[in-house]
Image (cartoon, rainbow, N blue to C red):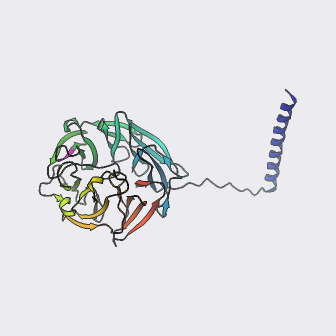
Amino acid sequence: MNTNTLKKAAHILFTGFIFITISILSGCKSDDNSIPPEETTVKINHGLAIVSGAGDVKTTFLQGLTDLNRTSIDNANGTEVGQFSSIYSDGKAMFTAGFGAPATMKKFVFDKTGKAVLDQEIIIPGSNSFSSLEILNETTGYATVGGGISKVIQFNPATMRITGEINLKDAGDGLFYSDMIIRDNNLFIALNDFGGSGSAKIAVVDLSTNSLSKIITDDRTATLFNTLTAEIMTTDAQGNIYVQASGLFSGKPSGVLRIKAGETEFDTDYFFDLKAATGNTCFGLYRFSNGMVCTTISENDDNFFGTDGANPSFRYRKIDLSKAQDLGDLEASLPNTFAASRTSFMKQVSDDEVLFAIAGTEEDALYSYEISSGNVSKKMKSTSGYITGLITLK
């Protein structure tokens, strides 16, 4: 061993000795039997998704929030997903439905610091996107995928394993399986053919056998189109299912159809012609616990899919499903938003508050609607992109 090496080793040993000696002396001098503080655990009550990027290059950042009492948010504490994603929850974890091949659903949990951590994922080779998730309970969920191979899978949210597949080949080819809703022992799946058939189509699946019972159709409207963030199916307190169709590419008006409680056919006595009531093409359907219902209207169908990125064309609109009436603009001061090309969702977070997304040219934000007063206010501005989802954890 050469001299330099010996000097180096001696220096390391001496430094270690001094450190240990000081530590012992310090411990003897201040021996107050103190216990080091425990690591703080952050309790996460909400999950949020923000999409950043431009053009075809987009990514989603997921983060947990202890509460919603903040005026702005960014993605500094976010966990990157790598795809445009919307989010869902079983009350304990956060699930992403991602756009971009291969179709990928990810499950995230939150660590002690509140960071979203990838737990497991499901990938469907040959498909471009997950379209919708419906989580029934801790062990049973359903998901639709489309673009390339279209299919409906049953999965276990706890283990993230595919446990079955529902065969919808008899529904026809060229269909996108979109929004879903479960009622009684049936799964109702909206079938989107982008107006090709000139009718609205829904697959009714018997969940006791996971098999297709029938396809129901209605030619008063067409095109059951929804995006990852938007919903087009809802139920009321009596168990009636309402289905919103845009009418795009079909020559049919936007409208709402009904499947009455206990039945599995469209109600021939009910049709809400949204085009006639609002004068516009409509997109999305959201119902809340007090019976309030909203949709969005397109003020310029040529920019329905946001091809003119400088001029968002959608507005939130109140409607009455039972009376089939238009109740007007949600709030005149609201900016227009890109609903079909970026994000559109509404979520009730308390008995008196509904949050909804605005994605525009001047701002990206969550707004709040107070049910009791009808007041609308800005809740939270995003400085890092538009918000594509909000979940509440138990």
Query: In this view, which residue lies farthest toward the right?
Result: 3
Residue nearer the viewer, 333 or 67: 333
What's the residue at 18%, 65% (across, down)? 323
Q: Which is more toward the observer, 28 or 201?
A: 201
Residue 40 locus on image (x, y percent): 59, 55
Q: Quadrant of the N terminus?
A: top right
Place of residue 338 in the rendered image (x, y in percent of width and height, measured from the top left): 35, 55
Q: Is residue 346 above or below residue 127?
A: below
Residue 37 belongs to the span the image colors magenta? no
Task: Look at the picture and state if 389 lies above or below 329.
Answer: above
- For the image, the number of numbered tags is 0
Q: Is residue 386 above or below residue 278?
A: above
Vertical placement of 95 versus 122: above or below? Answer: below
Find out whether residue 199 is within the magenta segment. Answer: yes
Please, which residue is most extreme toward the left here?
Answer: 269
Relative side of 264 to 353, left or right: left
Res. 200 visible in picture: yes
In the image, taking residue 225 as reference, residue 38 lies left or right, namely: right
Q: Position of residue 68 (x, y in %)?
A: 46, 62
Q: Quarter of the image for the C terminus: give it.
A: bottom left
For the question of whether residue 288 can be seen, the reply is: no
Q: Nearer the viewer, residue 357 or 337?
A: 337
Quadrant in which residue 244 is drawn: bottom left
Which is more toward the observer, 311 or 160? 311
Q: Residue 269 vs residue 392: left or right?
A: left
Q: What's drawn in magenta, residue-wise?
A: 197-203
List x then y, in percent, for residue 180: 28, 48
Q: Tell me which residue sits at (80%, 46%) in the image.
A: 19
Residue lying at the far bottom of the rendered structure:
373
